[in-house]
Image (cartoon, rainbow, N blue to C red):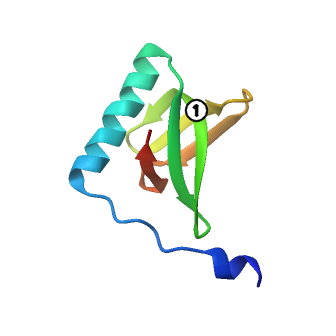
C-alpha cells in the first residue's frame, strides 16, 4: 500500500520521442555502446544503463545487458526516454 502512493501514470510519448529512442537503440546495437534509458514498469519510471545485444522487431523486444553485465529485456513500449 505504501508503494501505491508513489506510482505515476505512464508518460505520453510524441512520435519524435519514439523515433529518437529507436535511433538510439539502433546506434547502441550497431556501435556496441552503452546508453542511458528511462523505462516505465509497475507504475514507476526507472533509469538504467544498458548495452543493446539484439532487437526483435516482431515482438518489439530489446535484449540487453545492464551496467553489471546482467541480461535483461524490455518491450519497446516500456521505454520512455533515452539520455
Spot the residue most to the bottom: 1
Residue 82: image x %, image y %? 43, 41
Q: Give the residue drawn at x 64%, y 75%.
A: 6
Spot the residue most to the left: 16
Q: Give the residue drawn at x 77%, y 81%.
A: 2
Report the residue marked by disc 1. Answer: 50
Q: Relative to residue 4, is residue 15 drawn left or right? A: left
Q: Give the residue drawn at x 50%, y 16%.
A: 32
Q: Say which of 47 and 74 sits in front.
A: 47
Above or below, 27 relative to 59: above
Above or below, 41 relative to 60: below
* Quadrant in which the C terminus appears: top left
In the rendered image, is residue 81 in sight? Answer: yes
> How would you rate the neighbour count of disc 1 (Cα within 10 Å): few for under 14, some for 14-19, many for 20 or more?
many
Spot the residue most to the top: 31
Residue 42: image x %, image y %? 62, 67
Residue 21: image x %, image y %? 36, 41
In the rendered image, is residue 59 in sight? Answer: no
Residue 29: image x %, image y %? 45, 23
> Which structural element holds mark 1?
strand
Above or below, 31 relative to 82: above
Amino acid at each position: 500500500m505504501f508503494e501505491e502512493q508513489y506510482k505515476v501514470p505512464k508518460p505520453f510519448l510524441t512520435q519524435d520521442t519514439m523515433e529518437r529512442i529507436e535511433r538510439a537503440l539502433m546506434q547502441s546495437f550497431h556501435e556496441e555502446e552503452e546508453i542511458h534509458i528511462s523505462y516505465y514498469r509497475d507504475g514507476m519510471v526507472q533509469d538504467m544503463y544498458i548495452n543493446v545485444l539484439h532487437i526483435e522487431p516482431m515482438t518489439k523486444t530489446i535484449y540487453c545487458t545492464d551496467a553489471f553485465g546482467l541480461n535483461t529485456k524490455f518491450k519497446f513500449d516500456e521505454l520512455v526516454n533515452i539520455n
